[in-house]
Structure formats: C-alpha cells, structure tokens
Image (cartoon, rainbow, N blue to C red):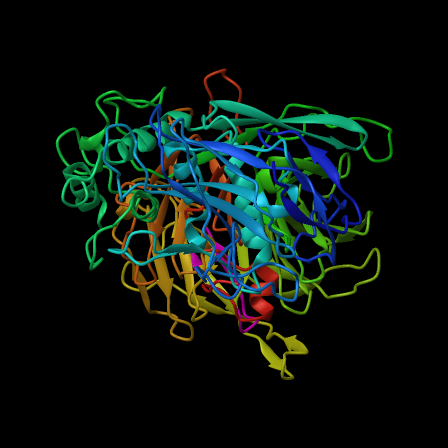
Amino acid sequence: MGELYMTVRASWKQSCSVAILLMFSCCALLLTGCGIGATPAAMEPTAIGPLMGNVHGGQQPVSGANVQLYAAGTSGYGSAARPLVNCAGAPDSNRVHTAPCAGVSTDAAGSFTITGDYTCPPGAYVYIVAKGGVPGGSNVNSALALMTGLGACSSLTSSTFISINEVTTVATVFALQQFMVATYGTAGAESIGTSSTNLTGLQNAFASIPLLVNTSTGQAPASSAVKGTVNTTAVTVNVINENAKLNTLADILAYCVNSNDTSSISSACVNLFAAVQPAGQANAPADTIQATLDLALNPGNVGTSSSGPAQYLSADLPFLPNLGSSLPNDWTLGVSYYSPTATKYPSGTGTSSGFLLNGYGLTVDANGNVWVLNAASVSELGPGGVPLAQIFNGSLSAARGIAFDTSGNLYVTNSGSAGAGAIMKYAGGAITSYTAPSGYTGLYGIAADGLDNVFSVSGTGISALLELPANSSSGAILSVVQPVGAAAYTLAVDPAYNVWVTSTTAVDATEALATCTGTPVSSCSYPSTALTYTGGPSGMFRPFGIGFDSAGIPWIANSVVGTSGNYLTQLTPGVTSAGMATAVGAGGLNNPQYLAVDGANHIWAPNNGVTANTGSSVSEFDDTGAAISSNGYVHNFSGPRGIAIDASGNVWVSDLAGGQNSTGSSVVVTEVIGAAAPAVTPLALAVKNHAFGVRP
C-alpha cells in the first residue's frame, strides 16, 4: 500500500484536545481563546498512511464515484478550491503537486482509499467530494454530488475514516454555505473559499460540522457533549441538535441521489432541482450539492406534502429520525448549549453556580469565541462549543451589558447591589472596576468605539450617557457626557463615532453627535445635549436594541407596549422627525428587543414574544426593511435577549427564559448554523474600520 504524505505544521503555543464527535485541536488562551487565524510554518512532510472511507446514497453504496479532496480557497468568498489527490502537475513552492488531479474511484461497496502521495498546503482546511457513480441499478447518476467537511488538513491521520452521504452533505453545506459559490446549471461547478482577511471565519465554520454529524459514521446525533477544563474544573457543555430536521433534508436529497440517468439526468433530480430553485436564480441546480446550497440559502422554501421540496421526501426515508409529516417552519439548523457545571473561582475561594445557566447577553471576540453573560459571571465558548474560560466569578451582581474594545479587553456593566453603577474590565487576567458618579445607577447597556473609549447609560436614578475614556486608571470615575431619556437601557456607537441611546419611557432615541479629529480618527468630543429622534410617522414603542447598516443608518427594535410595537424603525441621521418602519409583525416579529446586522447588510432580530418552552424565532430583513423570513426562523429558545453574528455567519442568541430540550434541561445559548453573512467582530472593530454590514 502506498503512503499518504502530509505537511505537519509547527504546534501552536498552547493546545488542548477536545472530545466531540470528531477530534479537533485548538489553542486556549484565557481571554482571547483560539488564535487560529495565523498560519504556522511548514515542516518536512511526514508519512502517515492511507486515508479511507465510503460513499453511500441513502443506505446504498455508490460505486464508480470520483472522490477528490479539496483545500478551500483563500483569495475570496467562494474562490477556487484546490484539488489535492493524484495530481500530475509540477509541485509548487510548498512542494504540493498541482493540477491536473485525477482523484480516486469507489469500488462496488462504495469504498475508497487514497494512497497516492500528496501534501497539505500550509494552513489548509479541506473537504472531500464524491461525484457521479452508480447508486444502485446499472446506470450512473451524473447529478450525484456529495461532500464531507473535514477541517484542518494537518489533522487527518491514517485512522481517519470518512463517510460521505446525504447527511454529511447537508451538515457541510449548511455550516459552510456563506463561503460557497456555485455556477448553477453546471454540474460540479461549486467551490468553497474565503477572503484572505477572514481565514478565522472559515476555520471556525468547519468546527460546526462535527456538532451536526459524525463524519466517520455519517449519522446526525440528537445530542452530544463538549468537554474542557475551566478554572481547574472539568466542564461539560451539553449540545442539543436538530437532527430530525437535518435527516429530513437528507431524505429529500436521497430522492435524487438514489436515481439513475436515462438519456439525461433522472426525472427525480429534474423535479427536485426545480422545486429548490429560488425566484430570480437563472438556472436550476445541476447536482445535489447545488440543490443543498439552494435549500440552505433559502430556508423558507419548505413546501408541503404535495408541493415544493418537502413533496420529495424519499418513500423509504433512509435517514431516521426525521420530521415525517410534521414539516418545519424553515430549514435553518440550530445547535443549543447548556451547562450546569459549577466551576471554581480563579482565586480558588468559591465556586460559580454553573458554567452556562442564564443568557442575559453575549458578544463575539476577534477570534470568533462567544462570551456569554450569566448575570454573575461570564463564560467563554470556543468554536464547536468548547468551554474555554469563566471569569468575573464573585465580582458581578445583576450584570446586563457586555462588549469588547478593539484591544481585546472585555467590559461588563454591574447594575446590582454589589455595584449599583459600575463598569468592570477584564484584561490580561486582571479585573478593574470603574464607578459612576453618585446618583447615576442601573448601568445596563455598554459599547466601545474604535478608540477604545467605552460608553454606558444609567437606566435608573439620573439618566445619562456615561463615558470611560480609553486607558483610564484603576478606580476612575465615569464622566457624564449628556442627559438622556428615562429608562434608557441600550446604546451603540456608529461608524462616525456618534453614540445612540434608546429610552423605553421617553419613547425616543438620542444621538450624541461626535466631533472627531484626525485621519484616521484620533479623538472625539461630544456636546452637552443630544439630538432626539421620534421615529417618524409611525413613532416608536418601547424602543430597545440598536444596530447599524453599511451606511451607518441606525435600526431600532420596537418591543411590545400593550397592543403596539412589534416592528423595526430605520432612523434618518440628522433629521429627527423622520423615520421608516417595517410592517407590524413582519417577518415573524414578536416582541423584538435586540438587533444585529450581518455582512450582507441584513438585519436580524430575536423574538421574545413566544410562550416559554414552545420555541421562539429570529427574524431577518434586508436593508430596505423587507422581510426575508416570512415567519421568523424557529429554534429552541424562549426568552432571547442578546444576539450576535460571527465571522462564520453563525447567528448566536442568548436565552434568559431557557428553552427546554427533551430532557427538560434549560438551554442558554443557541447557534443558528451559517444562516447569516459573516460579520466583523468585535463591534468596536466595525466602528474603527467602518465595517458594519460588510463581510470581513
């Protein structure tokens, strides 16, 4: 048997082994987590043996399929991926052979073995694709295309066994959809790639795949567990998957996969491809990977038992459990996390009440790690749900706001009895407290600008916008910028460094208009009074969350006041009486309280208006206010508070009420896999780089 050669790269400064369904390696730094954007230097190739697997359509082996391993592109979103197996071209500067690349073929049992010499390009993340072949019967299926995302090329070993089927295809496409481009109408013309400035986003997207599917068995688990060590405590993060929905999608694909060409592609594939083709797309898919991508990018196209994609559920339903006749609201796939594990305080003098127990808010750092505000502590989840850190144990009381500055320092508002008006800073393992002047209490929202100045707002006592200047010394008193309306809880900084605040009692939004100097900006000042916005003809009702589109235009979530609310307002900067509102309840809006804007300039709002434990939703709109989600995207949360979108396109929602899973345990965080366009994180970096509403 030949040998598989792979470039082995220098180990990262700190690494940890994490057991999920497929072993992934990561580096865990206390604050910033995995620094996976860097590419370590290449070392000499090492012989590690063959790579093996099988290809199945439903439960049938696919014989004669061509199997090729690809390294994702790095020159742009959807940029050309690089084939790696059985390449006959001259080696490049990294001694990786170039095209043409023949791949290998599956045998009668659907099995394949890659024994030809190949080398992983430095830092490559890879996926494997099977095309064509005979899925039973005697004729090939030229529309058959299945794939499995594998992650870091350097992680593959001779013991890696790869299953390629409809389930692995759905999991891979949904996780990587924001990095995929297809030439619809041409079979095999799809690719995965990222920009040179968002390698981290692609790498973290690969980490979601083993949460959805076991890539060795090709099965979707109902639940799993991710383990790590936090503050010397073994922590288990429990993961709840929507495996029945994923299997339903796989069963729909099987309708085409398990068919054969006649004079052209089968009528089963023609019918399915027409059903998934969205309006405005010139050509229908030409293979099953393209069909899966259409379903992922257009998740509202569910259909019924007699129309749309759902009518093509395979009669034999090869993948179970599935949803059967109980079709979903949408096709988006969610993963929910909870962990009651109590960890020790870093000082060793006490324990937390749990690693993930409450979801008052969350934010995403520059490495894609998610920081969840538990009211009395903050917990860090790495890619794939890895527990990395828990901080502020014993230092917080009724904390409500959380934000990073551009330097990676974390700030939290402390509004309870232990700190009625304080901002807590975590940097380099040290905690620093900054207090508000006497009378300014109930600090709630928090935001940082591109200069690392931090702002908060006092929602009780004297209502005002407060500032903590960058590099303030320990014990500094927050400065008062200007008064704001009563019950002001939420604020945000736009790309021009203006600070916007919403007031639920005054029913308005105020803008602290910045006067800045320098190119790039080096300093800003604010007047003692603010501009006050009423929201235009529709007004505002209990305005709360704020987000900005690529033009720096603010969007406001109007939550419920009696029978009013349930819409979004777009303000017009500088015109205080102007504003545009979405229709009440549009897109599934039901008591929206927070907002996030993705890299395609789409506005996302979680809905807090569904009865606990029945499943709530998150709504999506384009930058004109037109609803993209007809009824919202429904997942396992019931009291959503915070929302954030990471550089992989995952939509993260924290849950205060705690949606219930089948075991009755409360979920705290839900990740909607790959549903949004990748966004710049943290938000302070978007302020600094004028990068709201654009991909990194």
Q: In this view, does 683 lie to the left or right of 34?
A: left
Q: In this view, does 307 lie to the left or right of 168?
A: left
Q: Is residue 608 visible?
A: no
| Residue 577 location (% of width, % of height) | 35, 69
Decide which of 384, 691 is in the foreground and name it: 384
Q: Is residue 124 left or right of residue 181?
A: right
| Residue 272 location (% of width, % of height) | 20, 40
What residue appears at the point 67 percent right and 62 percent down from the top-left corner?
A: 406
Q: Is residue 332 visible?
A: yes
The quadrant of the image that shows the N terminus is: top right
| Residue 558 location (% of width, % of height) | 38, 50
Decide which of 374, 413 is in the foreground and name it: 374
Residue 185 placement: quadrant: bottom left
What is the residue that sits farthest to the bottom in this orientation? 518
| Residue 103 location (% of width, % of height) | 46, 47
Decide which of 302, 640 is in the foreground and name it: 302
The answer to whether 135 is drawn above or below residue 6 in the figure is: above
What is the residue that sits farthest to the front in this orientation? 1
Callout count: 0
The answer to whether 187 is drawn above or below residue 329 in the figure is: below
What residue appears at the point 35 percent right and 40 percent down from the top-left corner?
A: 633
269 inside magenta stretch:
no
Task: Write down the region rendered in magenta.
Answer: 495-508
Decide which of 294, 530 is in the foreground and name it: 294
What residue appears at the point 20 percent right and 32 percent down from the top-left corner?
A: 312
The answer to whether 103 is drawn above or below residue 315 in the figure is: below
505 inside magenta stretch:
yes
